[in-house]
Amino acid sequence: MTYLAKPKLHHPTLPKNKVGYTRRDYEGKVSTLCAGCGHDSISAALIQAFWELDILPHRVAKLSGIGCSSKTPDYFLGNSHGFNTVHGRMPSVLTGANLANRELVYIGVSGDGDSASIGLGQFAHVMRRGVNMAYILENNGVYGLTKGQFSATADKGSKAKKGAINADEPVDTVSLALLMGATFVARSFSGDKKQLVPLVKAALAHPGAAFIDVISPCVAFNNHPGSTKSYDYVREHNEAVNRLDFWPTRDAISVSYEEGGVIDVPQHDGSVLKLRKLHADYDPGDKINAQAMIASANVKGEVLTGLLYVAPDSEDLHAHLNTVATPFNKLGEKELCPGSATLEKINATLR
Ligand SMILES: Cc1ncc(C[n+]2csc(CCOP(=O)(O)OP(=O)(O)O)c2C)c(N)n1
Ligand code: SF4
Ligand SMILES: [Mg+2]
């Protein structure tokens, strides 16, 4: 029934957020994905996070590549800016948009084929440059849209639906993001909305490149026994290192926590990440330890989830480049084209 349009009228008593919108105002078109696809659960988590953060939909820009995952921005935030780029090229297009206008909230949606195969170079560089964005990788281990070929994140030894065994080493996207200098790195599961929603909220508030790899089973091509990206496998091997509670600046912290069981990570905008420790040895501020624990979990076939790393003092690309704060579309002709005398001065400094 995907051809049916969603009704525009809302029930008058639906709860509204602080900017006067209902949760339905953050929805998009009816999804055309397969029933049970993990990607639809991620869209629902994104809707929830944006609504709870009271973000004005017209202040959001959502960009994606190509794939079932990259189609999803059509199914959430229907009143926001959106651009469906070329396969694997979301990061460079988002970088350009962000440089032209830093006042929007940027979200990039991609798949494992989109980010770890054709777009691997773009993914690596957007992490190391610190573009201010929430990068959501909907990771199912296959090229869903082109009918189930192994992607570069499929684990070595995992079995395809028709029995073929993957002989190639996988790209571990969270390890790569850490190596490339991402300042916020998390992993989650599409079937765990309680974990995913606060992670998305924290990623949106983080200044710099915030990466969340979300294991998102493909029910059509990669949800059978032998697959390491199936619902059953992830549920059985999910090892959460922490549980995040995200506290925006204006909300008073009213919940009491068991002593010693919580790590506070204050953010530069005044918000606080409260992490309930589930794993005694895990410190998300210690990058070297995070890398070691991720590698050791990979060897054991565990799926390590939670906020894996966050840098307390992150900066974004604009700070690195010392750019002008005003978006290009608000600058006048005089600022954009200051004339030949100014150009001559700039050229003189380069001689
Ligand atoms: C330049 C280019 N090469 C190949 C393709 C064909 N293609 C479309 S989607 C896709 C893979 C999608 O996989 P993934 O990013 O994992 O998304 P999923 O469908 O699994 O969510 C490929 C290879 C394309 N559209 N463009
Ligand atoms: S083919 Fe797989 S990834 Fe694509 S919509 Fe269907 S279940 Fe989701
Ligand atoms: Mg995929």
Image: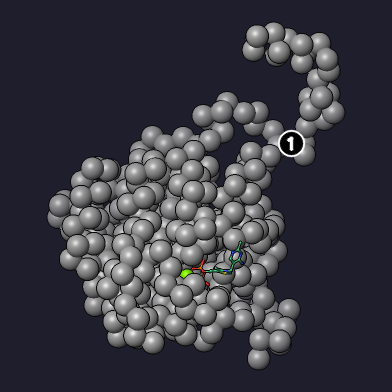
For the residue pair 243 and 286, the one nearer the viewer reads as 286
Which quarter of the figure has residue 163? bottom left
Mark 1 crowd level (few <14, some 14–19, many ≥20, 10 Å Cα): some
Residue 297 image offset from top left, x and y in percent: 21, 61
Residue 180 makes an appearance in the image: yes
Q: Answer above or below: position of 40 versus 102.
A: below
Residue 168 image offset from top left, x and y in percent: 33, 65
For the residue pair 8 and 163, the one nearer the viewer reads as 163
Secondary structure beneath dot 1 equals helix
Residue 279 image offset from top left, x and y in percent: 18, 58
Which quarter of the figure has residue 311? top left
30 sits left or right of 155 in the view: right
**What residue is shown at x 23% (from left), y 73% (from top)?**
237
Residue 277 image offset from top left, x and y in percent: 22, 56
Q: How is the structure coloured here? A: one colour
**What residue is shown at x 32% (from left), y 52% (from top)?**
175
Q: Answer above or below: position of 138 versus 228.
A: above
- What's the residue type where badge 1 is placed? Phe
**Residue position marked by numbered label 1 in the rendering:** 328
**What residue is shown at x 56% (from left), y 57% (from top)?**
88
For the residue pair 192 and 336, the one nearer the viewer reads as 336
